[in-house]
Each structure stands twice: as structure tokens, then as C-alpha cells.
Image: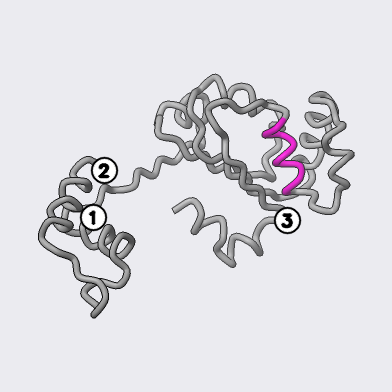
Amino acid sequence: VARQVFNHEDVKHHFDGLAWVCVSQDFTRKNVWQAIFRNLRPNEEEKKILEMTEATLLDKLSRLLETSRSLIVIDDIWKQEDWDLIKPIFPPKKGWTVLLTSRDESIAVRGDTAYINFKADYLTIDDSWTLFQRIAFPRKDTAEFKVDVEMEEMGKKMIKHCG
């Protein structure tokens, strides 16, 4: 859902800059800030970005976000402490919007009065099976490929363990 919002034409026209940053479990704040800067300033020389200190990145990103409308997606953040490390770049004046994705709802809720929660619904067993078939068996029941009973049973067991 976040990717669909990010790629929507109306969103692209509304914001001056867009940044998508996937946060891994072993991220560094500097790498996240560099990725945001790289996305918002694509013409900036890569060598210069890599040489910037955290203090320089903090200053440049804060000034950039004060003066432009930007959408920053922080994708798959794992811990509140990680968000606490990243968020100093966001100045109080809001021309920017942050969209957080996380498996832990408490990360977005804590400390943000403008918080809006969207929780994706789980697929039904039937919908899960249909999706699984489209991915696992793209040529279902053609002359060279048949989904036999054993494959179907194994697939249905697998989807019971998803989400």
C-alpha cells in the first residue's frame, strides 16, 4: 500500500521531492540520512554525499525539508529506538511528510499527534491460495505442467503458516 501511495501520480505532483528508504535491522543513521539526501537531491555528486559527516547531513537535510514539500517513506523500521535516531533531521516546520511502515504499531504512535494508522487486512485462506497459485504455478494446467493433488496439498499447508 505504501508503495502504491508513493508511486501515485497525484502524490508525485504534490511533492517537490520523494525519498524511499528501506531500514534494515542493522542500519546506521548516517546511511539512512545519506539515502534520503540522495533521493531528494539526485544530482548531488555521490562522492560528496559519502564524505558528508552526520552533522553536515543533519544540517543540509533539515534546511532542505524546511523549504520544500517532501514525502519520505521510512520502510520496515524495526524498533522505536531506530526511529528516535533517524527523526532529528525533520524540522518542526512541516513542509514534509513521513510515511512509516513497521510491523510494530507502537513505533509510529509514540510521540506523533498527527499519527494515522492503517493496518492491512489479512487475506482469507481462499484469497491466499489464489495468490499463491498465481505465483507458484504461473502456467497452471498447461500441456507441459499439471498441478497434482500432492502439490496442491503442500501449497495449502504452506499458506496456513503465512501472516
Residue at which label 3 appears: 16
Q: What residue is shown at x 51% (from left), y 54% (from top)?
A: 3
- Indicate the quadrant where residue 34 lies: top right
Q: Earlier in the sequence, mark 3 or mark 1?
A: 3
Q: What residue is shown at x 71% (from left), y 40% (from top)?
A: 35
User: Dot 2, how many residues are within 10 Å of its Cα: few (below 14), some (14-19), or many (20+)?
Assistant: few
Out of 24 and 7, give the one closest to the viewer. Answer: 24
Marks 2 and 1 in Cβ contact (< 8 Å) = yes
Residue farthest to the bottom, as pictured: 143
User: Dot 1, how many residues are within 10 Å of its Cα: few (below 14), some (14-19), or many (20+)?
Assistant: some
Q: What residue is shown at x 57% (from left), y 27% (from top)?
A: 83
Instruction: Say left or right for 145 vs 11.
Output: left
Quarter of the image with the C terminus in it: top left
In this picture, which residue range is highlighted in magenta? 31-39
Residue at which label 1 appears: 128
The answer to whether residue 38 is magenta is: yes
Out of 111 and 146, give the one closest to the viewer. Answer: 146
Residue at which label 2 appears: 162
Residue 59 x %, y %? 83, 30
- In three-dimensional space, the C-alpha distance between marks 3 and 1, rounded to whole angstroms, equals 38 Å
Q: What amino acid type should be assigned to the residue bearing mark 3?
A: Asp
Depth check, mark 2 against mark 3: the one in front is 2
Residue 58 x %, y %? 78, 29
Colour pattern: one colour
Instruction: Say left or right for 152 vs 47.
Output: left
Q: What amino acid type should be assigned to the residue bearing mark 1?
A: Ser
